[in-house]
Image (cartoon, helix red, strand yellow):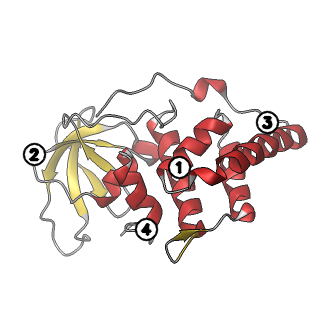
């Protein structure tokens, strides 16, 4: 379980839509010798090989050791799948076309924003639009200065369970909210955060 959302509505919908981050949340701890890539936080994009998985009682069962490709010989890094999102390399997992062309770290943060919103709006299996919760989506994207169009934001939310009937309202609110935040605070989204789209892992 990661932050209480491992089997959430948003994560399960994301997995069905091919979201690499949601798939990583639900995958089992990799075996020793597996080539992996870290998808989130400050190590996003780091690749390496799983070196040890059966650690002693000092470590949680969700922990393993990895030898990163760029580290010096003999150095091992601790990875905890409780919060580190890991994907196997070479599995040919395609990157879904709905995922905006952002860095892995930015895309992972956007995924957390989307999952949190969709989970909050899911009430007894029914999606209930919550405009106040959507303000947190807009604010989170603005704070990270993510260069997203309203359509891209809604594509991510739709992949994580937001019904199509809310698309128009979500796009309008996102555009107006971002424009207001930029106007009042003067911090534009950073266009350079858009990168070349990955084809797969």
Q: Secondary structure at mark 1?
A: helix
Name the residue that disc number 2 marks: 33
- Please tell me which of labels 1 and 4 falls first in the chain: 4
Q: Secondary structure at mark 3?
A: loop
Q: Are marks 1 and 4 in contact (CB under 8 Å)?
A: no
Name the residue that disc number 1 marks: 158
Name the residue that disc number 3 marks: 187
Q: Secondary structure at mark 4?
A: loop
Q: Are marks 2 and 4 in contact (CB under 8 Å)?
A: no
Q: Residue 95 in the image: state x and y as whole percent.
A: 36, 35
- Please tell me which of labels 2 and 4 falls first in the chain: 4
Q: Are marks 1 and 2 in contact (CB under 8 Å)?
A: no
How busy is the neighbourhood of tag 3: few (under 14 within 10 Å), some, or many (20 plus)?
A: few
Q: Can see residue 29?
A: yes
- Please tell me which of labels 2 and 3 falls first in the chain: 2
Of 96 and 183, the residue lying toward us: 96
- Please tell me which of labels 3 and 1 falls first in the chain: 1
Of 56 and 147, the residue lying toward us: 147
Name the residue that disc number 4 marks: 8
């Amino acid at each position: 379980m990661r932050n209480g959302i491992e089997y959430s509505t948003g994560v399960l919908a994301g997995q069905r839509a091919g979201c690499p981050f949601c798939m990583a949340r639900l995958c089992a701890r990799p075996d020793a010798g597996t080539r992996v890539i870290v998808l989130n936080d400050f190590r996003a994009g780091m690749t390496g090989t799983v070196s040890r998985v059966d650690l002693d009682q000092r470590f949680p069962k969700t922990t393993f050791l990895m030898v990163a490709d760029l580290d010096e010989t003999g150095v091992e890094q601790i990875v905890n799948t409780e919060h580190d999102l890991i994907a196997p390399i070479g599995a040919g997992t395609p990157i879904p076309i709905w995922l905006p062309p952002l860095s892995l770290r930015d895309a992972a943060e956007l995924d957390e924003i989307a999952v949190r919103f969709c989970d909050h709006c899911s009430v007894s299996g029914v999606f209930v639009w919550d405009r106040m919760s959507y303000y947190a989506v807009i604010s989170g994207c603005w704070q990270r200065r993510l260069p997203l169009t309203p359509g891209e934001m809604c594509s991510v939310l739709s992949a994580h369970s937001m019904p199509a009937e809310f698309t128009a309202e979500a796009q309008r609110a996102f555009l107006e909210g971002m424009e207001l935040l930029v106007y009042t605070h003067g911090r534009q989204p950073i266009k350079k955060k858009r990168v070349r789209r990955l084809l797969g892992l």
